[in-house]
Image (tube, helix red, strand yellow):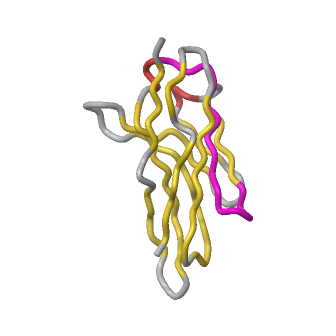
């Protein structure tokens, strides 16, 4: 089994910062791309940012400059540094990873989500 566990969400005031972390664990052979998505109430899940094992990144256009994705390949972890947070950033943030288990094909895995609330 493979698990993705997010942490670091919470309540923050507008203009504040949060750092999300996601750890992949289990019967892992290789972790390929990792990323963050978010889903606000009443809206579809949307891309926040992705990062390859080599460090190449893709961001949602609206978030460039405020959010930074990074990863630690040795620890199978991905991070999301969020700065200058806005009320519109309020959502459940999900970690995603493309992982190959030992003796298996590559599959997409999702974390359980962590709530980020931006409010004064």
Q: Residue at x 65, y 36 (%)?
A: 68
* In this picture, residue 42 sits left or right of residue 21: left
Relative to residue 63, is residue 52 depicted above or below?
A: below
Residue 26: image location, x then y, percent? 55, 73
Q: Residue lying farthest top? A: 120
* In this picture, residue 83 sits left or right of residue 1: right
Q: Residue at x 59, y 41 (%)?
A: 20
Question: Foreground: 113 or 97?
Answer: 113
Q: Residue at x 50, y 59 (%)?
A: 4
Residue 42: image location, x then y, percent? 25, 31
Residue 75: image location, x then y, percent? 70, 62
Q: Would residue 69 be counted in the magenta stretch?
A: no
* In this picture, residue 107 sits left or right of residue 80: left
Q: Residue at x 53, y 30 (%)?
A: 61
Q: Please count the marks in the image.
A: 0
* In this picture, residue 81 sits left or right of residue 111: right
Residue 118: image location, x then y, percent? 48, 21
Relative to residue 54, is residue 30 depicted above or below?
A: below
Q: Residue lying farthest bottom? A: 103
Question: Foreground: 61 or 17?
Answer: 17
Q: Residue lying farthest left? A: 42
Quadrant of residue 28 in the image?
bottom right
Question: Which residues are the magenta region?
Answer: 72-86
Question: Foreground: 7 or 62?
Answer: 7
């Amino acid at each position: 089994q493979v698990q993705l566990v997010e942490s670091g969400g919470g309540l923050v005031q507008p203009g504040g910062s949060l750092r999300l972390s996601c750890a992949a664990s289990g019967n892992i052979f290789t972790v390929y791309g990792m990323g963050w998505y978010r889903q606000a109430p009443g809206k579809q899940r949307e891309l926040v940012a992705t990062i390859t094992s080599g460090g190449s990144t893709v961001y949602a256009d609206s978030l460039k400059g405020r959010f930074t994705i990074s990863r630690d390949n040795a620890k199978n972890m991905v991070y999301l540094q969020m700065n200058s947070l806005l009320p519109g950033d309020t959502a459940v943030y999900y970690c995603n990873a493309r992982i190959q288990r030992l003796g298996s094909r590559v599959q997409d895995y999702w974390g359980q989500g962590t709530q980020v609330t931006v409010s004064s």
